[in-house]
Every structure is written in structure tokens, then in C-alpha cells.
Image (cartoon, helix red, strand yellow):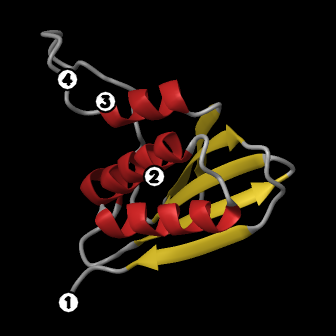
Amino acid sequence: MPQARAFARAALNGWGIRERADEITLCVSELATNALLHGVPPGRGFLLCLNREGGVLRVELHDSGDGWPLLGVDVDGDGDAESGRGLLLVAALADKWGVVERDPGKIVWCEFGTDVPGVSARTSRRPRE
């Protein structure tokens, strides 16, 4: 997820957000990884948006897949669940997070309190051809 992380870092640096930059960048990476592994149908990309309003930074990851994210599900009960670990990190680091249905797909989002007033940035990732 180097492109998603680089985009987030550039936006955060441009806005002067340094205090929570590592947490935000890690959450961007986890959401983008989840989208590529579980949410994006073959041949499609996703849209990453960072918006700031009223001291809150919101990260949104839009994808067109029909899979729904699950938080740390241990299907076989052996404690080795690999699916959902990224969302556990997002839940621990972000102030809020959630999922909103859209047609097609969904938006997975997380929010962080900041002390810099709002602006927004967005980028999309398309699969390599």
C-alpha cells in the first residue's frame, strides 16, 4: 500500500498534521489493504478520501465489492484469526470507525480528532494493466 500511505502522508504534511500522522497513515494502509484483499472485484480499484472539517480528519475508503468487513473474527476458535486484524488496529487507533453501504459496494471510514481546521483531498487507485 505504498501509494495510499504516500498520498496520506503528503496530505497530512500539507495540512500540518504531525501529532497523529503515524496512526492515521497506519489506518489508511490497513483500510486500503482490506479493500484490495476483500473488497475490490478483479480489474477494479478503490477511492481513498481524506477530509478535514471542524478539527476532525475523516478517512474514507470506497470500494465496489459486496464483502462486508468483520472485526477480528476467529472462525475456527484457535486464536490465529488473520482476517479482521487490520480492523482491530483501526478500532484501537481511530476515535470512531464504521461502514456505510453504497451502490455498488461500501465505504469504510475512520475519524481522528485534530487541531487544524478542515480541507479535503482525494485520490483513486486503479489496478495496474
Q: Quadrant of the C terminus?
A: bottom left
Q: Is residue 97 left or right of residue 6?
A: right
- Do the CB atoms of the residues marked 2 and 4 lie less than 8 Å apart? no
**Which of the marked residues, 1 or 3, is nearer the chain's N terminus?**
3
Which mark identifies residue 129?
A: 1
Q: What element carries label 2?
A: helix
Rounded to the nearest whole Å, what is the CA distance between mark 1 and mark 4? 32 Å
Rounded to the nearest whole Å, what is the CA distance between mark 2 and mark 3? 14 Å
In the picture of the structure, the residue carrying the numbered disc 3 is 85
Say few, some or many: other residues with alpha carbon within 10 Å of mark 1 (under 14 / 14 to 19 / 20 or more).
few
- Three-letter residue code for mark 3: Arg
- Three-letter residue code for mark 4: Ala
Q: Which residue is drawn at 17% across and 11% down?
A: 79
Q: Is residue 9 above or below residue 126?
A: above
Q: Which of 104 and 61 is in front in this view?
A: 61
Say few, some or many: other residues with alpha carbon within 10 Å of mark 2 (under 14 / 14 to 19 / 20 or more).
many
- Three-letter residue code for mark 2: Val
> Which label sits in the foreground, 3 or 4?
3
- Three-letter residue code for mark 1: Glu
